[in-house]
Image: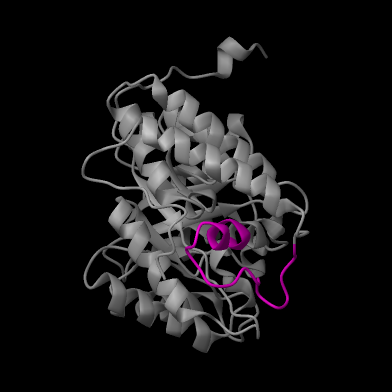
Amino acid sequence: MKASEVTPRLRAGREIEGLSAVLLPFDEQGAVDFDGLQHNLRRTAEAGLTPAVNMDTGYTNLLSGEERLQVLQTAREVLDGAPFVAGAFIEGAAGKPLSLYKNAVAQIQQHGGTPILFQCSAMKSLETQQLIRLYTDVASECQKMLAFELGEMFVPFGQIYDLETVRGLMQIPQLTGMKHSSLNRELEWQRLELRDRVRPDFKIYTGNDLAIDMVCYGSDYLLGLSAFCPEAFARRDRLWREDDARFWELNDLLQYLGFFAFRPPVPAYKHTCAQFLKLRGRIACDTPHPRAARRPDSDIEVLRDISERLDAMMQGVSEPTLELASTETLL
């Protein structure tokens, strides 16, 4: 198929909604650094992005139920009524998926968050209508909920739905959007085209950290990459809204960071994020979760170069109301 037959038009000047999967930092002993989490949450919200917690960037699949609850409590306290998204994660828990999801969703809503349903292994055995019924039943107890397609390169229990399933999910009133993480542009373009025909107000949040320019075609985003520097993503989004050509230069540098961070093994990007945030004075320690994949220390010099280039570029598109203090310790 020719590229001209599948590539949609650019949508310059549109407002981009940015959700940012916040990094959960750890200390040198391998314990959660809740002070660092508070700072990451506050910085994300102040940049103008909506924080997302208990996501892949927050190691949700490696946390205990009690730790996920503590993260929710921290988000509620720090954000003080400001919106945030939180992952409803049930993989490995004993019980029926419907009851488990309803309990997880209720807990998130009690803390003021919008739930996004992580997939689970049990979903893979469901036929299309059974799957849609599961989402419908869980969403019936929500004011607002998000879905999540997660490729198996991230977790073995993830799956990418066919378009019939996606169409069915779009018709659930309380389901207002879907994060799509296939790392495949064409699959995401198909969802945008379907969205425009079936339900124009439905959000497609790109999870493609290797193609963050999907926002140019009509996607919004829920990205782990934005946790590296939410201020830069917010600035990039403003440039797109204003149809400013400097968008492309800033986007290209952020994409360079994305290619470096999300190289195989992909899950190790979380350690890269910790290295980057420590380098920029955002967190005290770059130790990842004790059971997480790690990057070599030699990566830090590459990240330092990207950080310095990012600072210089941000100064070129600065706003008087937003100061970038990337190399100044904010702890």
The residue at the point 31 percent across, 71 percent down is 141
Q: Quadrant of the C terminus?
A: bottom left
Residue 249, position as x, y percentages in the image: 49, 25
Main secondary structure type of the part rendered in magenta = loop
- Residue 175 occupies which quadrant of the picture? bottom left
Residue 65, position as x, y percentages in the image: 53, 85
The residue at the point 46 percent across, 35 percent down is 312
- Camera-side residue of 29 and 268: 29
Q: How are the colours assigned in the image?
A: one colour
Q: Is residue 142 visible?
A: yes
Residue 189, position as x, y percentages in the image: 52, 29
Residue range corresponding to the magenta coloring? 274-294
The reply to whether the magenta stretch includes residue 145 is no
Up-down relation of residue 170 to residue 312 (above or below): below
- Residue 315 occupies which quadrant of the picture? top left
- Camera-side residue of 4 and 125: 4
The residue at the point 69 percent across, 49 percent down is 301
Q: Quadrant of the N terminus?
A: top right
Residue 316, position as x, y percentages in the image: 38, 30
Left or right: 92 in relation to 80 = right
